[in-house]
Image: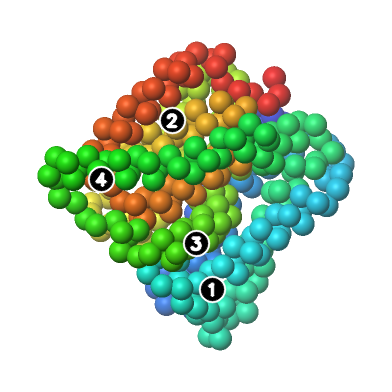
Amino acid sequence: MPIREFGKNHPVILFIGVTYVWTWSFWIPANSDGLPPGMKPALTFLGAFGPALAGSLILRLRTSVYDSRPRHWGGFLVGAALAATAIALLYFDIAGINRLAPKPDLIFGSDAPWRVHGLMAAVVVISAFVFSNVQSRSATVRSFYKGLIPSRRALLLAIPVLMFLPVVLVSSNFLADIAGISYEAPEYSKQSIGLWLPLMFVKLITVAMLTGGNEEHGWRGVLLPMLQKHRSPLVATLFIAFVWELWHFPLILDGLYGDQHIALIMTARVVAILPIALIMTAIYNVSRGSIFLCILMHACFNTQLKLFVGTELMALFVFVIVIASVLITRMWRRSSGYIPVR
């Protein structure tokens, strides 16, 4: 069966296959010992584009080769500029949010071989390719990716999305203080706001473009609406949460999420990733397909959790918010899901 016909008849299977093959082809080698300086992060960044590339492929298989080309190159140039900016920001030590110190050895060190610089150039090109979908000649491709451009509704919702985790985490810390529950002091309390606040936004940009947010072009941008065409948002989200977590398996093997038994780590992450997936689904549907907001929310989760920490009471807050999101959006009803093209 030709790949185009298979993609039209079994888009979800092809999406998952392409996503896993692309990502694991880079993430598994990234676990190897003795890699040259800069190679591990470069491979990790490239692998993270698996869902975005799979989504682009699925949509382009629905149209002709000519129609899949961009009408203009503005989206391509914007995607390249954003990725290049994020890579440039890696010069700063933003992981610990402790100091603003140059770290050129991360990617651009003098010991890094030419292959690393080539891989980082590929990151820029792939980002540009994904963003070019916004100006595709195909109405179908444009309808899915128009959510990359923030609408008026998305801009209004951006502030609540940006403030969601800080409010939840700080509130849980405040209640813990009242109840006399001890917890680890959050990073923001150890530094002046003039230091951690700009660094938070720097990290948001790098995560949005390189280490998390760039997944949303595929997971929420394409796979979620494809599933919602035939299933309720709730069922679609449960499926995505499982596939999404299993996709991280090479990173779990590499010890990124701890050194406990793999089964324990995966179980804990499934429990943690499900409410995140439900919140993302609610954001996508309420905003009428805003990939921009999903990218922002993903970047916030990957950045603000480490900055604001939170206590055990955070789980109660999140539980109430998730249940409210499911009920308010009637996530169990298929008609509640937003579909760009019916």
Mark found first going from the N terminus, 2 or 1: 1
Where 23 sits versus 338, above or below? below
Mark found first going from the N terminus, 4 or 1: 1
Quarter the C terminus occupies: top right
Specify few, some or many for label 3: CA neighbours under 10 Å numbering under 14, 14-19, or 20 or more.
Answer: few
Q: Which residue is mark 3?
A: 198
Residue 203 image offset from top left, x and y in percent: 49, 59
Q: Nearer the viewer, residue 58 or 99?
A: 99
Q: Identify residue type, mark 2.
A: Leu
Q: Tell me if label 2 and label 4 are in contact, CB under 8 Å.
A: no
Residue drawn at 27 percent across, 36 percent down: 315
Q: Which residue is mark 1?
A: 91
Q: Residue furthest bottom?
A: 110
Q: Considering the numbered disc 4 on the image, is that residue within a helix, a strand or a loop?
A: helix
Q: Considering the numbered disc 3 on the image, is that residue within a helix, a strand or a loop?
A: helix
93 vs 11, left or right, is left
Q: Considering the numbered disc 2 on the image, is that residue within a helix, a strand or a loop?
A: helix
303 vs 188, left or right, is right
Q: Nearer the viewer, residue 201 or 333?
A: 201
Quarter the N terminus occupies: top right
Q: Which residue is mark 4?
A: 173
Work out how far the residue at label 3 is from the one at label 4, CA to CA, in angstroms. Answer: 22 Å
Mark found first going from the N terminus, 3 or 4: 4
Q: Identify residue type, mark 4.
A: Asn
Which of the two discs, 1 and 3, sits closer to the camera? 3
Work out how far the residue at label 2 is from the one at label 1, CA to CA, in angstroms. Answer: 34 Å
